[in-house]
Image (cartoon, rainbow, N blue to C red):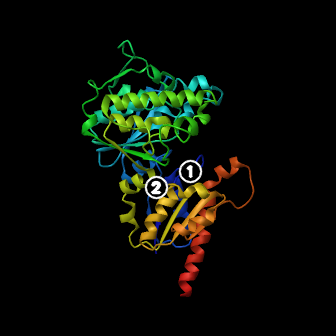
Amino acid sequence: MKFLLAPDSFKESMTAKEVCQAMEKGIKNVLPNAQIIAVPMADGGEGTTASLVDATHGQIITKKVVGPLGKKVSANYGILGDGKTAIIEMAQASGLTYVPIQKRTSATILQTTTFGTGELIIDALNHGVSNIIIGLGGSATNDGGAGMAQAIGITFRDQNNQKISHPLGGGDLNRISKIDLSNINPKINKTTFTLASDVTNPLLGKNGASYVFGKQKGADENTQPLLDNNLSHYASIIKKAIGKSVATIPGSGAAGGLGAGLLAFTPAKIEPGVKVVARETHLEDKMQNADFVFTGEGGTDLQTKFGKTPFGVAQIAQKHDIPVISLAGYLGKGIEQLYEYGFTAIFGILDKAEPIEMALKNGPANVSRTMENIVRLIKYLDEEK
């Protein structure tokens, strides 16, 4: 039998590669001669770099950059096996994990910047890549990508035509009067940018960056409209300076509006993250002639069908009439709807009620045991044919 393994990471428990290894162990306990193809997956968020580097035998690059609070942080990005494609998770440089919970306040979100993400872009270009994939998610920022823009050479000027030199945050955007693109890194427009995102929120409004994602980063009910107004001003200056309208593009509100900044200042296109990862890993080609596809994620519920990894995997498998079995740490409401979209069966991996810390620690063993039981049933049914 041929099994294709294409799970996402189980957050705080296992990377996607580790999930594949646990799945394989369970299969081999029953069918030691089974053909197994492992394709660690992701949807553009945390784990995307590791998944693509693992799948393509690439390398991890580490660089010190300006973090969201203005202090230096150590950030990783990947160069894929082709040597020409970089994968950057913006959260590595500008993520919420760099902001302690007690500092997630309105004052902080007005200051947090994506400058470090721009520094990673420049470093990747200096490594000779011609394609850059940027995972949008997990941000601490609401700067519309203005900090990133500064790092790649964009100059913002105030009403007195003075250059704004410090890394911009969301609270500074109303100061921008002019945009000068004359010093942008010349490699930018010669590079293909793909933005991987699992959200479709626009930049502005009640469904935009400030209102939907601002609260988790510290914005209160007074700060959210201020940030939204600043982004609106920023978008109008972009429209005036370079003729691009980024305010309502689906996904432009991702990562605190970094999507909008990248769409404005680079030749970027935005796509569902799982679609990008599937293409780069050649998932559909590797799926050919598989008897079963196994996928999974930390938690599966109704939200899974809105672009999460298992959903993307199931959609591809459905085109080829391949059964899809998904595993999850927990099962939430609405999973019965997933059976309409290519899922054959969905299993929770926990064998007993236990504290979350133990469940996370026991993740690999729980995945292996669940896989073994599923494959034992598959083997029995196959032998009974």
- Left or right of 367: which side holds 72? left
Label 2 and label 1: CA atoms lie apart by 11 Å
Q: Residue at x 51, y 65 (%)?
A: 294
Q: Residue at x 59, y 33 (%)?
A: 217
Q: Dividing the picture into quarters, in which one does residue 19 lie?
A: bottom right
Front residue of this view, candidates 281 and 192: 192
- Residue 233: horizontal and vertical position, in percent? 45, 27
Q: Amino acid at mark 1?
A: Met
Q: Earlier in the sequence, mark 2 or mark 1?
A: 1
In the rendered structure, which amino acid carries the disc numbered 2? Answer: Pro
Mark 1 packing: few (<14 Cα in 10 Å), some, or many (20+)? many
Closer-to-camera residue (314/250): 250
Query: What percent of the width, then of the height, locates residue 333?
Result: 66, 59
Q: Which quarter of the figure has residue 102?
A: top right
Q: Secondary structure at mark 1?
A: loop
Counting from the top left corner in percent of width and height, residue 148 is at 40, 30
**Image height of 301 relative to 319, above or below:** above
Please report the residue visible at 54 percent of the width from the left and 42 percent of the height from the top. 207
The numbered mark at residue 40 is 2
Please give the name of the residue rendered at 31% of the width and 31% of the height, measured from the top-left corner. 242
Residue for badge 1: 14
